[in-house]
Each structure stands twice: as C-alpha cells, then as structure tokens.
Image (tube, rainbow, N blue to C red):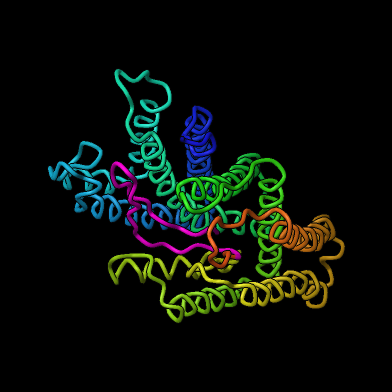
Amino acid sequence: MLQTDSEFTKTRWICTIIGLGFYLVDIVTDVGLAVKYFLVGDLVWAGLTLLSVAVASAATQVFSYTWYRDDMRKPLVNPGGDGLICEMNRGGLIGLHVMQTGIFTRYYDLLKVGYRAVFSKPLGPVECPRDVHLALFGRATDLSMLKLFETFLESVPQLVLQLYIMLGHGHRSILQCICMVGSFINIAWAIVDYRRCLRRSLPQVREMPSGLPTFVYLLYKLLTITAHILSLSLFLVLSPYSTLGMAVVWLAGTLWAYWVRTDFCMSKGLERLYRIIVGVVLIFTFFNVKGQDTRWPMAVYYVLFALVNLSGPLLLVLVRPEVNASEYFWPVTLLIFGGTVLGLVCLLLYYTVCHPRRRSLQGDEVDGHMAQERETETPDNMVRVRNFLQL
C-alpha cells in the first residue's frame, strides 16, 4: 500500500509553484539591480551582479540538458524509443537550453505531470501508484538539484557581493534590500526543498519528518551560511584581495572532489564541471560528495569554518580600528558570533536527535550528497531515480 508520506500530493504540487515564484523573484530582482547600477554609472557592480546570474544559469542549463539527453537514451525512461523527452526531440531541447529556459521546461513538465497525478480523476484502475509518485519525486529531485546549483552559484555569491557594496561603500537602496531578501529566501527554500524532495524519491531512505527536524535542519544551514556570508563580507571590506583567500578555499574543495573521485556524471567533462561547483559550495557549507561517513572531515571543516568566522571581525578591528565607530560593525559582529554558535548547536542537535535514520543496516550518512544513476526495480515496472545523498 502506498504510504501517505510517499505521495506527490496537492500540497507538494502547490509548493512547486511557490518554488518557481521564489526563483523568478530572485532572478528578476538581481537583473533589475544590475540595470540600476548600470544606469547610475556603477558599471563594475552591474557587471559583477550580472556575472553571477549568467554563470549560474549557464551551469544549470548544461546539467539540465545533459540529464535530458541521458534520459532520452534510456529505454526504461523512454520506452517508446521515439527519441522524445517532454514531447521534444534533441534539437528542441538544445534550443530551449540555449535560450536559458531549461529549468522552466522542467517546472512546466513537473507541474503538468503532477497535476494529472494529483488533481485529475483516473478513467480506470491506476497501476503502480507508488511508482508513479516515485517517478514524480525523481523529476522533482532533478529540478531541486539544479536549483541547489543555482543557489550556490548565484544567490549566495550575490549576498556576499551586495553586503560588501553596502558595508564597504555605503551604497544602499530599497531594490538592493529586496534583492538580498529574495536571495536569502531562495537559499532557505532550495536547501529544505532539495533535502525533503530527495529523501522522498529514495524508497530505502526514511522521509525527513516535518516540524521540528526540518526546522532544526533549516536553522543549522541558514545560521551557519549567513554567519559565513557576513564574515566573508567583512574580509572583503578589509581588502578586496580577500577574494584570493576564497579562491584558495575553492581550489582546495575542487581538489578534494578530485581526490575522492566523485562519480556524479557519466561524462568526464561534465564531472570536471561538477567538481568545480563542489569547490564553490564548500566555500559556504559542508558538502559530502561521496555519501560516505564524514564525521571527521565534517568536524574539521566546521572547526576551520568557526575560526574563519571569528577572525573576520577581529582582523577588521586590528587593521582598521576606525570601523568600531561604524553603525554596522557591532550588529554584524554579533550576528556572526551568534549565528556561528547557534548554527553549530543546531547541527549537533539535528544529527544527534532529529536525523532520520536509514531503514537498512548500512552506515548512516552524516551530511552531503552523492549522485549515481540508478534504476529501482518494482513489481510492475522500473522507475528511474537519480540518487543524490543529502546536502
């Protein structure tokens, strides 16, 4: 019998529309802010604001098209063998992704298929409803993974940039605040939506309970990421050359992904791009790229993470003591200290009390995700699920 928490429900369908709305607001406000910078002559800020949008969009389109192409070649996903996915051939998919509309295509497909599954009345007996809903969550997981890429390539860097402009140059505007709020909401939504959607797409993994576990997990991620963003912004205020330090962290994360030999993609070229993105994510939060037990790497990461957060305000005071008189320094410093401490407390609370354990006897993952293409056999048919372990 299909369990209730495995169903792609009407609430989940509505949440997909809400997620699309947040995504659109985030993109539109960022582009609008870049246009405003351009009109007032701040060409550097305009270019940097647009750069993060362009890089994130290009990367997600590449992954989206590749996954569509892989699905098109699989007889279990495309049993008709007609070379069509979402009623489009390869040429049509290439055109849509060149026009940067791949994510919107996935939203349209998920909403259309999901509507038929949860709103339309079946004309006859429905076979394998469990497989139908797992397939829907598989599509939703692909989409949420792309949103996660977009979040760490666009929304998070955008927050760092706008905070630097606001704190270091005193440039403030209502649109800038709206842009930052939009990015923050998009980060929160993408993280929780991905984790919950992922666990529902995997039949051997327990669902992430709603309520307190989800709330604690959200606090852990948001508090640690926000504290780190604020700390990195202070480093940039201290010196724009702090970007070199971020580049070193990115390089270390990318090399780590090479060292553990990630196997996310089917092609070597795309795997390299994935490892580059892993390096970006590791600047801001822990990311287990192999799905292994990572208690010690995670502990080392967050010790260094806390030291970086606490050193940001300290170095700014020592090198530029005049910032003590600024109106932002002490509130930002308190947010960094409080966010770091409370975020790590929530991390410990989540993994010791609230974390949903696997049903199997396999070792439980600590944090992170791995991607492998796998096909899960059911009594009636085969359902393709792209397996990502959690961020």
Q: Vertical placement of 258 versus 287: above or below?
A: below
Depth order, front residue of 14/338: 14
Depth order, front residue of 44/147: 147
Residue 108, percent from left and from top: 35, 34
Q: Does residue 44 appear in the picture of this structure?
A: no
Apparent side of residue 88 relative to residue 275 in the rendered image (left or right): left
Q: Vertical placement of 285 versus 143: above or below?
A: below
Could you tell me which residue is drawn at 30 percent across and 53 percent down? 67
Q: Does residue 301 appear in the picture of this structure?
A: yes
Could you tell me which residue is drawn at 16 percent across and 46 percent down? 91
Q: Residue 365 occupies which quadrant of the picture?
A: bottom right
Apparent side of residue 80 relative to residue 222 in the rendered image (left or right): left
Does the magenta segment cover residue 221? no
In the rendered image, which quarter contains the C terminus?
bottom right
Does the magenta segment cover residue 378? yes
Could you tell me which residue is drawn at 37 percent across and 18 percent down? 121
Depth order, front residue of 387/265: 387
The residue segment tinted magenta is 366-391
Residue 229, percent from left and from top: 66, 61
Could you tell me which residue is drawn at 46 percent across and 64 percent down? 370
Q: Residue 45 occupies which quadrant of the picture?
A: bottom right
Residue 36, percent from left and from top: 53, 43
Q: Vertical placement of 56 versus 313: above or below?
A: above
Question: In the orientation shown, which residue stands out farthest toward the right?
Answer: 325
